[in-house]
Amino acid sequence: MNPWLYVCLILGIFLIEIALSFLLNTTSIAILCRKTGLTLRVSLISGILYWFRLYLVIRLSEWDFFLMGASVLGDTLGDILVSRRKPKKKKVSRKKSPFTNA
């Protein structure tokens, strides 16, 4: 295999794993928040990425430790990115009292 193609394959697997991990964790958060539309979109994208990654690993390589390492590191980094997200602040609305002190 061409060395440049091999490096691109390792980098591609790493980036796909980051995206896949991020999307799967986002799906879990969306399910817990009961956001059906977001859950559907993110789940479809993560399913496509999963099968694309599986195709790359099976079709273009055999049991390669560098690809396995890139996959594990990408998955871990994706988990870290989701866990470091700042929670969205909810707007606090103050209702005006119908009674006044005047």
Image (cartoon, rainbow, N blue to C red):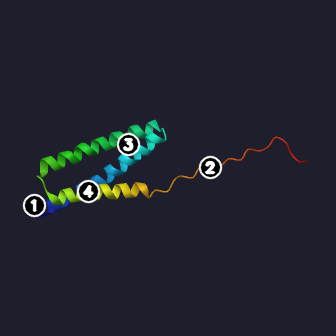
Residue 92 picture location, percent across and down: 65, 49
Distance in Å between CA atoms under marks 2 and 4? 38 Å
**Quarter of the figure that contains the N terminus:** bottom left
Circle 3 SS class: helix
Disc 4 or disc 1, which is closer to the eye? 4
Q: Which residue is mark 2?
A: 91
Choose mark 2 or mark 4, whichever is in front: 4
Q: Secondary structure at mark 2?
A: loop
Name the element at disc 4.
Answer: helix
Number of numbered markers:
4
Specify which label sits upstream in the sequence, 3 or 4: 3
Q: Is residue 30 left or right of residue 13?
A: right
CB under 8 Å between discs 3 and 4: no
Q: Along the polypeptide, which appears first: circle 2 or circle 4?
A: 4
Residue under label 1, please give it. 2
Disc 2 marks a residue whose amino acid type is Lys
Q: Along the horizontal axis of the image, is 97 left or right of 27?
A: right
Residue at image position (44%, 45%) is 29
For marks 1 and 2, give the one nearer the viewer. 2
